Every structure is written in C-alpha cells, then in structure tokens.
Image (cartoon, rainbow, N blue to C red):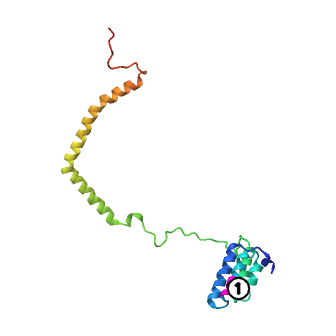
Amino acid sequence: MGDELFLRASDQDRNKVTNFLSDALAKGFITTDEMRGRLDVAIASKTFSDLLTLVKDIPGGAELVRDAARSHIRSNFATPQSYSTSSHLDLRPPHNHRHQTNRHPGLRVAALILGFMFFFQMATAGAFILFKLVSFMFILGIMMAPLFIISRIVRRSPRGSFRLIRKRHF
C-alpha cells in the first residue's frame, strides 16, 4: 500500500499540494513563514513521499497525496461490474426536436412580400433602367466584336507577317 508513495509526482500533483497549502494558510492551519518554506520544498519535490511530508500534519493532507498517488496506479481501462445481456435503442427524436421548416414561419411571408415588391418595382420604374442597361451592353458588344476578332487574327498569325498597312517600296 505504501509503494505508490515512491512514484514520481507530476506538475499537476505539485499544483494540488500548493493549492492545498494556500487553503491551509487561509484557514489558519499554517503561518506565512511555514507556507513559504513548504512551497519551496513542494516545487522541488520529486516523489509523493516528499509531498506527503509537507501536508501530513494538516487535516486532509495525507488523504490528498495518497489519492493522487493511487490515481497514477489505476489502469486506464475500467472493467464493468455487471454485464447487460439486452439493450434498448430509442430511435424516436428527442422531445425538444423542432423541424427546421417551422422555426420561423414569418420569414416566408417576408420573403414573399419582398419578392412582389421587387417584381412591381422592376415592372414599372425599374424597366426603364433595365432597358437602358441592356441597350448599352448591346451597343458596347457591337463595337467590341470587330476589335476582338481582329485581335484574335493578329495573335494567331506569325510574328511580323500580318500588317494592316503595307509600305510600298518604289
């Protein structure tokens, strides 16, 4: 039972002891001078037996160190105390389950109203702006098409072979 006290203590274990010592100071079990000395030893301690010598005279200190040491011995794989031969799988939705479609019914109404407002705005005053925009794009396309075609021809021809204006040699 005392073998676990010779295990090396971790930083977390030393922190538990220093927190316990500060609580003991607050409760009046030790003085500030004792606290300083014990904190220095706690930080430098290597094993659980070193930590136990610091807190064994304070109520609850020995149990704290022994429980911390025992927690390092326990295996990480817990075995169940009893085994169940049947199981129950509940496939029903939880009681607080809500359908996503019914969460905000007012949102559909607002989207419908905004859609009608946009349609009527485009049908009246917006139609003129849309007409101007489409006609501008059409005219721009008519003007840019020949430039695009000429640039493709020039790009595909060998360098220096295509010239729009040929110089005449006399």
| Left or right: where 97 falls relative to 170 | right
Give the camera-side residue of 102 and 160. Answer: 160
Horizontal and vertical percent position of residue 21: 66, 84
Give the camera-side residue of 130 and 54. Answer: 54
Residue 47, placed above or below residue 144: below
Would you say residue 67 sits in the magenta stretch?
no
Give the camera-side residue of 88 and 132. Answer: 132
At 69% from the left edge and 73% from the top edge, which residue is drawn?
Answer: 11
Q: Does the magenta stretch mainly form a helix, a strand or a loop?
A: helix
Horizontal and vertical percent position of residue 88: 59, 71
At 30% from the left edge and 31% from the top edge, which residue is drawn?
Answer: 145
Quarter location, residue 7: bottom right
- How many numbered markers are drawn? 1
| Disc 1 target residue | 61
**Residue extending furthest toward the front:** 33
- SS at circle 1: helix
Give the camera-side residue of 98 and 92. Answer: 98
At 70% from the left edge and 79% from the top edge, which residue is drawn?
Answer: 40
Residue 134, placed above or below residue 97: above
Q: Which residues are magenta?
A: 32-36
Q: Amino acid at mark 1?
A: Gly
| Left or right: where 102 falls relative to 65 | left
Quarter location, residue 27: bottom right
